[in-house]
Image: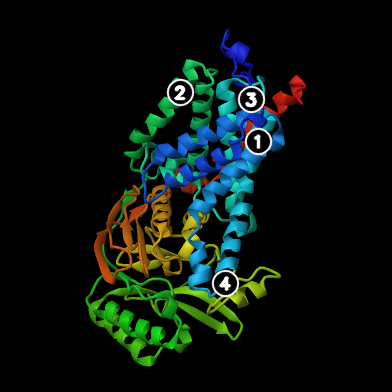
């Protein structure tokens, strides 16, 4: 490690480092960084431009290298973050204004403030990289490693602090690229570290301070993803089961009104009982009432359907354990177990499912049916279905790959397939739907298991263990997706270890860079 963090002179004699240009001369540094942030967003679904994620980060690295002061580097990273998040999560405005009845100006301000908060993380990465790797103390390869480590740590913080919001993590852009092959090995954060390191290598190459062997190593790491993607890290178990995924396309603005409730109850009862399947899955809160308020005739119709066809049903509904104790849950009925299966959502959405201290006024301003749920246990048993075990997750729980991996490795009998039930009607017909499908695809890659997605408005889909989409429904249409799905057993390296190896390596790189800087007496 010490040899790696050598000076450029030892690394490549005779090469000149590009001189730093004062940021004052770069009048458009911040707008250019913001534009690069928008380019970063374009790398994600519905596009498949994984290479643009690396190129945009390389552009950011080049701008940060020009910054004469640490605060200038942080400002460049912050501008990048603003462009990235404002262009990538603007659809939150729809949930707050169109469906949440928040005034337009306040909804826009909320999106701006949230994006401004998220932008602190790329600002931190830029500051940290400039702090540890500025000047000529490190070789181009070592500087790239530090950039990858700084980006990894900042993204991990964004995905964990204050319950975490890892949406648009750069690793997701690579579900269709060669780096997807690393998902079963190092997970999302390992991929984003590799991608950022490759971006750092591109930056160093553009400045002519990269040894050709380091460049060749970068190409080899990128290319190795393709053969890695062909390795089967998990194995088929049992027979494939026939699944039916329901997409009711119930408008969000009426879903929790009495007319919408009546419509949803009748619609999903009809869709569930239309024809047999070994597993039928509805979206989140498909029945938009408390389970305790379920009409007797509907409960009887579903039970009769299960008993007469041998089908299993997994449906979404809220549950009341008491007058003040609510859970967002998925319930299962089937011939493979006694009673009613129940999964309670563990990772709750701030404001929508729990109210942070001091923000009750914000929730009261929005048209939300419930605001405070109780968390379910972090590890809950899967639902048995015809020789398979199905592990539900609800809404954006599938953003948190570490939690899904932990539930698999800690379970007495790990699930053989995953099922995400969600309602994205809150965000309209926007890029949020494709972004969320891309997230589910990464979870399938990491776990080596199929992912079933049942959504109210889309994207309802079946994802194979290799992250490819087996079948999907068009968004904002009423329909049923039927497919035969093969369960998988075994644990991928990522499921066994979680994020610890990637994070540990990133921290070690940063500590080595810090030690090198202190040893050389650099400011």
State if disc 2 and disc 1 touch (CB < 8 Å): no
First in residue order: circle 3 vs circle 4: 3
Report whether 10 appears left or right of 332: right
Indicate the secondary structure of the residue bearing disc 4.
Answer: loop
Number of the label disc, if any, that sits on residue 21: 3
Q: CA distance from mark 4 to mark 1?
A: 36 Å
Crowding around mark 4 (Cα neighbors within 10 Å: few <14, some 14 to 19, many 20+) is some
Question: Which image quarter holds the C terminus?
Answer: top right
Give the residue at mark 2: 217
Indicate the secondary structure of the residue bearing disc 2.
Answer: helix
Indicate the secondary structure of the residue bearing disc 3.
Answer: loop
First in residue order: circle 3 vs circle 1: 3
Find residue 201 and report its horizontal and vertical position in percent: 51, 26
Q: Residue at the location (56% across, 32% down)?
A: 61
Number of the label disc, if any, that sits on residue 103: 4
Find residue 486 and report its horizontal and vertical position in percent: 28, 56
């Amino acid at each position: 490690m010490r040899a790696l963090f050598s000076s450029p002179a030892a690394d490549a004699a005779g090469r000149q480092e590009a001189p730093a240009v004062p940021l004052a001369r770069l009048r458009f540094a911040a707008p250019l960084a913001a534009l690069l942030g928008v380019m970063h967003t374009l790398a994600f679904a519905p596009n498949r431009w994984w290479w643009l994620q690396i190129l945009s980060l390389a552009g950011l690295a080049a701008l940060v290298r020009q910054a004469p002061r640490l605060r200038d580097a942080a400002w460049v990273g912050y501008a990048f973050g603003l462009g990235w998040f404002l262009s990538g999560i603007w659809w939150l405005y729809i949930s707050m204004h169109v469906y949440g009845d928040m005034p337009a100006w306040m909804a826009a301000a909320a999106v701006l403030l949230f994006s401004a908060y998220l932008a602190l993380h790329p600002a931190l990465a830029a500051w940290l990289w400039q702090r540890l790797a500025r000047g000529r103390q490190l070789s181009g390869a070592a500087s790239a490693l530090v950039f990858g480590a700084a980006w990894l740590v900042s993204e991990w913080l964004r995905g964990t602090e204050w319950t975490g919001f890892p949406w648009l993590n750069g690793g997701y852009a690579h579900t269709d690229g060669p780096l997807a092959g690393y998902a079963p090995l190092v997970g999302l954060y390992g991929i984003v570290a590799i991608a950022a390191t490759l971006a750092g290598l591109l930056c160093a190459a553009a400045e002519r301070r990269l040894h050709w062997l380091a460049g060749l190593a970068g190409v080899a790491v990128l290319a190795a993803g393709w053969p890695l993607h062909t390795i089967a890290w998990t194995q088929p178990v049992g027979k494939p089961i026939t699944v039916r995924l329901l997409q009711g396309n119930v408008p969000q603005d009426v879903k929790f009104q009495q007319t919408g409730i009546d419509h949803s109850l009748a619609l999903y009862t009809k869709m569930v009982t239309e024809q047999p399947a070994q597993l039928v899955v509805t979206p989140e809160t498909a029945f938009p009432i408390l389970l305790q308020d379920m009409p007797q005739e509907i409960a009887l119709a579903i039970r009769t359907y299960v008993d007469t066809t041998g089908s299993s049903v997994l449906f979404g509904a809220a549950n009341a354990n008491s007058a003040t104790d609510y859970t967002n849950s998925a319930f299962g009925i089937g011939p493979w177990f006694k009673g009613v299966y129940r999964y309670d959502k563990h990772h709750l959405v701030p404001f929508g499912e729990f109210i942070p201290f001091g923000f009750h006024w914000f929730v009261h301003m929005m048209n939300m049916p419930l605001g405070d749920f109780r968390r379910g246990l972090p590890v809950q048993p899967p639902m048995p279905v015809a020789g398979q075990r199905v592990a539900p997750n609800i809404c954006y729980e599938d953003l948190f790959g570490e939690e899904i991996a932990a539930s698999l490795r800690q379970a007495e009998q790990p699930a053989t397939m995953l099922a995400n039930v969600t309602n994205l009607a809150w965000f309209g017909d926007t890029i949020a739907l494709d972004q969320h499908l891309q997230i589910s695809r990464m979870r399938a890659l990491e776990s080596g298991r199929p992912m079933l997605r049942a959504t109210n408005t889309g994207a309802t889909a079946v994802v194979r263990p290799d992250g490819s989409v087996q079948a999907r429904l068009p968004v904002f249409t009423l329909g049923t997706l039927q497919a035969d799905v093969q369960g998988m057993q075994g644990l991928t390296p990522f499921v066994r270890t979680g994020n610890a190896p990637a994070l540990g390596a990133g921290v070690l790189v940063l500590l080595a860079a810090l030690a090198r800087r202190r040893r050389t007496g650099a400011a």
